[in-house]
Image: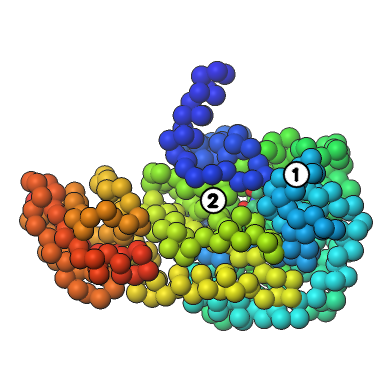
Amino acid sequence: MMKRTLLTTLVVLIFLSGSFGQTQTQTQTQTQTQALTQNKTQSGAKLHSQKNPVDQANRADWFKEARFGMFVHWGLYSILAGQYKGHNLPDTTFKYGNSWYAEWIQQRLEIPAKEYQELATQFNPIHFDADQWILEAKNAGMKYFVITAKHHDGFALWDSKVSTFDIANSPLKGRDILGELAKACKKYGLKFGFYYSHWQDWEHPGGDWPEWSKVKRSDAQFEKYWKEKSLPQVQELIQRYDPDLLWFDTWDEPNKITGHRRDELISLVRKYSPKCLINGRIRYQGPGDDIDFLEMHDNQYPEKILERPWQTPATMVHSWGWHATDYSWKPATEMLGYLVSNTAKGGNYLLNVGPMPDGRIPVAAVHRLREMGGWLVANGAAVYDTKPLKGVSAPSGVVFTESNKKKGDREIFVSIIKPLTTGALILPFNQSDVISCNMLETGQPVEFTEATAHAVKLKLSKAQLSMADGIPVISLRLKNELDK
Ligand code: FHN
């Protein structure tokens, strides 16, 4: 037992970097990464993938190539924007108030459930325009879109037949915003998915609450919720909107989301939609082998190439839902660094936006999305249709990706994600193998000379280093048959 704990800790230390999410503990992050990086089965799950492994492989093809997606947290909590009766998250005068996560405000600032649920009567996003949101995502270079159909508060952003805590009981009655978004995604060529909180639900009398709250659910109560709300709503989402992806969310859940319930949910999704992808957080500590991709914990970035499809869900600020006084906006350059670096390890970057209650995307988010999109217009070749470069270590602050193209010379992209101290960049390639070396954005040649027998030295000017919004990319063409 002790040995296992030590091994788990070691694996996590090796694979993970970055800070942990604010609502969960470190142990929550461990098992899934370990299980999936090691390709292990963690339980006696029914392995649908073994019945037809080809189907599963194909289903995730688009995801493996997508690289960049938009995540949207939007719901009743957006109305409060992190503030309630003069309190502003984080607020340590509340026992569990020390969190920036605005979508958790009901729990963190101890808002009575009834009062919180009445917010539904105020949900009136008069500026919501599905085309605008999806165009913003498309122009940012994003290839898929995932929205919170239901977050932990239990509010459904569609007219649900099994719950009255939904959009049909808000000023949006009669409007199908998820349908509008699905349509816009089709129109602009993005894949479309839903976040669905299948475990936590603070509205249904059987839905689970956080481990630290006073509300405890028995297994029988939870089973009632599971059968009455969770499973039927997932079915509704699939049958109405035909999503490409379902994003489930758990962390410390093994008693409520048992292996059996996980398999029941997976079977339901597979029954109604053979194409729909399922993420690993369906059961974080024991996802089994039949999920389609691994989900890192919030804002976490592995340090090594992972063989299975994976992604990092990430925020632009601390919070996921709109928080009016969370000013911690990350610069676009930092976020592009995560995108390129995840790409170099075979993963995706699902970047969150928390729209305001009136339906507008905050301007600080729009600004960053457009900056990122601009960078991708010039440097997208280093991200899309690439593969990780295996067996070659990049110098610190630099990442390598390789073009997927099958014919002709190899093309390696050298992305400088952290400023270099000098203009000399030593790369582990034989100088005699280098056919050409140019800035990707302009084609301007970069000088290169032999550094050692197996290393080439690039000489970059100040102007070249400051190109491309702080992340310059060099295209290095190498002979197909490398010299030994
Ligand atoms: O508790 C949620 C949180 O509000 C947010 O939805 C994130 C997104 O990854 N998931 C949970 C925390 O990990």
Toward the viewer: 244 or 450?
450
* Disc 1 target residue: 92
Q: Secondary structure at mark 1?
A: loop
* Disc 2 target residue: 299
Q: In front: mark 1 or mark 2?
A: 1
Q: Sort mark 1 into few (<14), some (14-19) or many (20+) by Cα contacts within 10 Å.
A: some
Q: Left or right: where does residue 9 sit relative to residue 104?
A: left
Three-letter residue code for mark 2: Asn
Image mark for residue 136: none
What percent of the width, then of the height, locates residue 28?
A: 62, 38
Q: Left or right: where does residue 432 sit relative to residue 415?
A: left
Three-letter residue code for mark 1: Thr
| Residue at (75, 44) in percent of width and height | 92
| Residue at (52, 60) in percent of width and height | 330
Toward the viewer: 237 or 4?
4
Toward the viewer: 20 or 273?
20
**In this view of the protein, can residue 237 be seen by the observer?**
no
Q: Which of the two labelled residues, at mark 1 and mark 2, occupies the earlier sequence position?
A: 1
What percent of the width, then of the height, locates residue 435?
A: 12, 64
